[in-house]
Image (cartoon, rainbow, N blue to C red):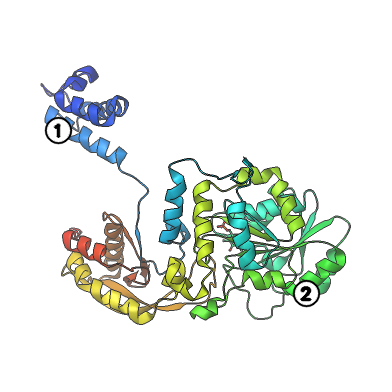
């Protein structure tokens, strides 16, 4: 406690009567300002403040802090294009326009304008999913994890689901297939081994309790060497003979052949269904380049069972997602323009020379931000797709590279972490990656360098005092 004379804090009521505080109440409302005043007075009692002027300033700062959005745009310079922690796919302007159009008022979300009766929210996307995948029917839920959960609980409640041991996947953020399986009320029947699973493994496991064969795309890892797995078409023929449906979780999946964009091959939803798979699930915000969603497409009778499951109601998408997804799907109508119009595909197919040009443009501004003590240059690097798509493939890219001049390795690494931290604290936070002895800022996802150049010219890296 500060017991020096004249430093007794005012009462809450006294502080609230000050004109400065009254003005804040006008602006931000009484309850929030009262909380900020209480916090300020506590700091006075803790002897961190001892006069009214400072108290007022601190209350102002506290309110600014509380009211500032915590959720804001950042610049993804990690080199991972579809980065789950950074919000995955950027949306095209058509999707933003579609969301805005239905956001502020009533819409025909679940209303059939023809009959004037209740409609189904899936109608806004189902026809387009079917057109683009060849599926008979489709439905959408909150994300692909929800899609898998829903398929399992609708098609195999209290029954056995056969999965290869090589495909018992865990996707980042605690999505583990065996756990999802038990939550869905299914019994997991593992077959084969981690590296090899054969047709007879499936055939031997099928019995009267089997309700579903499930194949999961091993998106975030690869089993290499002495391996063997059963293809979709072989599994489809087993499924048909045994009259058991076959579901495939594609993870990312793609509506087009990625190789046409010069990218590594990824399973194409239409091809997978054409091989006789009954139901597929895939994400809306991975390679599709749309909003977070889980798409379920396939046989009409199975989709109908899935849609009727009560879990569908709990996992459904909201109107903004559906508006964005519907707009993105329509962009797929013209395959020639896709690489331009879908931002995720545009970033992924960006030429290395174009990325190098961006890096060159950014270099002087970054050097000015970092100051004389830091070495900054451009270098060739490799970016990756992210979100489990083709985990082993890399795309040639260009990065800005920051290096510390300290002779001591520990100090260098500490300075790199400090550089990375201060880049994250900028008004437009910049997220890079530290590798070996440098901090890399991959320029693949920077299409407009101007805002970055502006902030790097305004702000300065604060060099830590030597310790
Ligand atoms: C990403 C992924 C999921 C989870 O999808 P979300 O849209 O993130 O919920 C499930 N399965 C596979 C194979 C995946 O790659």
Q: Quick check: 348 above or below 87?
A: below
Q: Examine the image and state in which quarter residue 246 appears.
A: bottom right
Structural crowding at the residue carrying mark 1, measured as other residues with C-alpha within 10 Å and reported as few (<14), some (14–19) or many (≥20)? some
Nearer the camera: disc 1 or disc 2:
2
Q: CA distance from mark 1 to mark 2?
A: 75 Å
Badge 1 residue CB within 8 Å of ligand 1:
no
Farthest residue, direction front: 114
Structural crowding at the residue carrying mark 2, measured as other residues with C-alpha within 10 Å and reported as few (<14), some (14–19) or many (≥20)? some
Say which label, 1 or 2, has the lower sequence index: 1
Q: Quadrant of the C terminus?
A: bottom left
Residue at x-position 20% and y-position 66%: 370
Residue highlighted by disc 1:
54
**Quadrant location, ligand no. 1:** bottom right
Residue at x-position 72% and y-position 77%: 228
Residue 144 in view here: no
Residue highlighted by disc 2:
234
Relative to residue 422, is residue 329 drawn left or right? right
Badge 2 residue CB within 8 Å of ligand 1:
no
Q: Quick check: 396 above or below 239?
A: below
Q: What element does badge 1 sit on?
A: helix
Q: What element does badge 2 sit on?
A: helix
Give the image location of residue 455, x and y in percent.
22, 60
Give the image location of residue 305, x and y in percent.
75, 51
Residue at x-position 53% and y-position 65%: 288
Q: Examine the image and state in which quarter residue 92 appears.
A: bottom left
């Amino acid at each position: 406690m500060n017991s020096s004379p004249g430093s007794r804090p005012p009462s809450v009521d006294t502080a609230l009567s000050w004109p400065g505080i009254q003005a804040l109440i006008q602006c931000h409302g009484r309850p929030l300002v009262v909380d900020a005043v209480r916090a300020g007075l506590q700091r006075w009692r803790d002897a961190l403040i001892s006069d009214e002027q400072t108290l007022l300033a601190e209350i102002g700062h506290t309110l600014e802090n509380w009211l500032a959005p915590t959720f804001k745009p950042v610049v993804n310079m990690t080199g991972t294009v579809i980065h789950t922690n950074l919000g995955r796919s950027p949306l095209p302007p058509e999707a933003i326009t579609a969301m805005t159009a239905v956001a502020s008022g009533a819409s025909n979300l679940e209303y059939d304008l023809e009959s004037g009766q209740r409609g189904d929210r899936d109608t806004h996307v189902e026809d387009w999913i079917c057109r683009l995948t060849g599926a008979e029917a489709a439905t959408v839920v909150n994300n692909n994890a929800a899609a898998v959960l829903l398929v399992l609980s609708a098609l195999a409640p209290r029954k056995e689901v056969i999965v290869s041991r090589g495909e018992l996947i865990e996707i980042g953020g605690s999505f583990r297939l065996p756990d999802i399986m038990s939550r869905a009320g299914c019994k997991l029947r593992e077959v084969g081994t981690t590296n090899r699973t054969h047709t007879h493994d499936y055939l031997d496991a099928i019995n009267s309790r089997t309700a579903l064969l499930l194949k999961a795309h091993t998106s975030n890892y690869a089993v290499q060497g002495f391996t063997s797995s059963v293809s979709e078409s072989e599994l489809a023929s087993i499924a048909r003979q045994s009259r058991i449906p076959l579901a495939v979780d594609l993870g990312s999946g793609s509506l087009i052949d990625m190789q046409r964009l010069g990218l590594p091959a990824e399973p194409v939803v239409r091809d997978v269904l054409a091989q006789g798979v009954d139901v597929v699930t895939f994400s809306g915000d991975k390679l599709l380049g749309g909003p977070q969603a889980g798409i379920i497409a396939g046989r009409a009778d199975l989709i109908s069972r899935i849609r009727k499951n009560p879990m569908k109601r709990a996992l459904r998408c909201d109107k903004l997602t559906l508006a964005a997804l519907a707009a993105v799907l329509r962009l797929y109508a013209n395959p020639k323009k896709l690489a331009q119009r879908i931002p995720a595909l545009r970033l992924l197919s960006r030429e290395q020379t174009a990325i190098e040009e961006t890096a060159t443009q950014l270099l002087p501004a970054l050097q000015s931000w970092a100051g004389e003590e830091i070495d900054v240059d451009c270098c060739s690097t490799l970016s990756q797709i992210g979100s489990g798509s083709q985990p082993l493939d890399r795309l040639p890219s260009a990065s800005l590279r920051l290096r510390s001049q300290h002779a001591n390795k520990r100090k260098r690494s500490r300075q790199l972490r400090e550089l990375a931290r201060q880049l994250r604290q900028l008004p437009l936070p910049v997220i890079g990656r530290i590798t070996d002895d440098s901090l890399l800022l991959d320029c693949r996802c920077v299409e407009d360098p101007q805002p970055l150049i502006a902030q790097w010219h305004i702000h300065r890296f604060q060099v830590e005092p030597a310790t």
